[in-house]
Amino acid sequence: MEAAVHFAAASNVAPELSVVVPTYKERANVPELVRLLDATLGGIDWEVIFVDDDSPDGTWEVAKQISRRDPRVRCLRRVGRRGLAGACIEGILSSSAPTVAVMDADLQHDETLLPKMLDAIRGGAELVVGSRYVEGGSQGDGFSRIRAWGSETATGLARRFLDIDLTDPMSGFFMIRREKVEAVADQLSREGFKILLDIVASSPEPLKTVELPFTFRERVAGESKLDSLVTAEYLGLLVSKLSGGTVPVRFLMFLAVGASGIVVHLAALKVALHVFTTSFAWGEFVATVVAMTWNFLLNNHLTYRDRRLTGFAFVWGLLTFYVVCSFGTIANIGVANSLFEMAGTGPWVAGFAGAVMSAVFNYVVSATLTWRK
Ligand code: GDD
Ligand code: MN
């Protein structure tokens, strides 16, 4: 016993609990969160791992400054990458503690729940979720009406399609046995916010789960990074999981952008023909360029926001995207035509096959040429 206590006190021995905190522009919240953790986790052997995506406000500097005085505080600074889920995964994988918790840095999650969560784990639970929806939990003032609606809809979809039986699968506040994440780490999506849902959906065996209520607090400093895009990514995650992970979320996003590009194409064609009274061929040409540009801008902003191109790379990226799409179009026409002519396929099926061909082609080639890592 003596020896065990001695080792636990040495700073290079894994504690019982790692609290993983993803941060992006949370400079003002970090010191306060450490203070709160310290106050609430007395008697527990814990550490906190901030995973910061190179925040421009220098969040990682603040965290590392604290960690110089306090060995329980660690900071992983990730460069050239963005994404909440990816940050959580890396933080968890950097831990050697048997149990890990994930919580937000912005003080919206009630840290006093952590000891109760750990009790549940010690009592045999494999996953403990801080839920806003079980009895006693609440949105508090931290939630707008629209967000509450979106969150409920997303929960309903998860229950229906992924067979997930949590009251709050969107929660960003949970504790889990680390080995359960390690086991599925290579199947988890790095994009989006839905890390918990993803872990649960990916686990081969149902996890022994406990849900504990908490009240979602209002954010004091900084601002939320959850936008409508996160919802789109969430829907993508659902489809991706339903396909058994064969269809990447990014491809679905790329397809959605492509679909919007068709609308833009038709609108541009209409304007060219009716307002500028161009010939059909010219109208098509202009509409194609407009739609390709639109797709590039949107993909650069949304699909590839984690590696968004700027400056010279932006111009070069746009040019390569034009080239990629041109070849994609040739592939489209080639496939559709040969199916239609030779195999005697109906025009709709042939056209659809051509469109699928070019979508896959554009996605795969632009991923390596335009938005290469
Ligand atoms: N490293 C990293 N990279 N951290 C990020 C990123 C990122 O790209 N985006 C956000 N974060 C961090 C924030 O700094 C914060 O600590 C935490 O992730 C949550 O981000 P918020 O922007 O505050 O999210 P929210 O409050 O809107 O959403 C919360 O509630 C949702 C439920 O409605 C989160 O807990 C979500 O996970 C949860 O689904
Ligand atoms: Mn928040």
Image (cartoon, grey):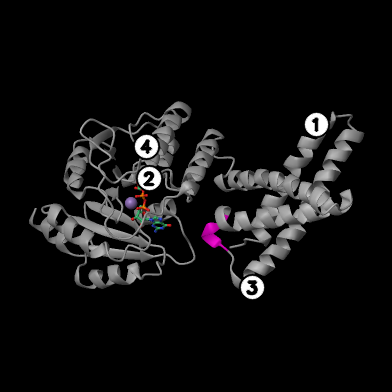
- 70 w.r.t. 119: above or below: below
Query: What distance separates the C-alpha of mark 2 from that of mark 1?
Result: 45 Å
Tell me the SS state at disc 2: helix
The answer to which image quadrant residue 133 occupies is top left
- Sort mark 4 into few (<14), some (14-19) or many (20+) by Cα contacts within 10 Å: many
- Sort mark 1 into few (<14), some (14-19) or many (20+) by Cα contacts within 10 Å: few
Tell me which label, 2 or 1, sits earlier in the chain: 2
Tell me the SS state at disc 4: loop
Tell me which label, 1 or 3, sits earlier in the chain: 3
Query: What distance separates the C-alpha of mark 2 from that of mark 3?
Result: 40 Å
Between label 2 and label 3, give the one nearer the viewer: 3
| Lateral position of residue 184 relative to residue 328, left or right | left
Query: What distance separates the C-alpha of mark 2 from that of mark 4?
Result: 16 Å
Residue pointed to by mark 3:
312
Pinpoint residue 215: horizontal percent, then vertical percent: 23, 42
Pinpoint residue 5: horizontal percent, then vertical percent: 11, 57
Pinpoint residue 81: horizontal percent, then vertical percent: 48, 62
The magenta-colored residue range is 304-308
Residue pointed to by mark 1:
348
As drawn, the label of residue 181 is 2
Residue pointed to by mark 4:
169
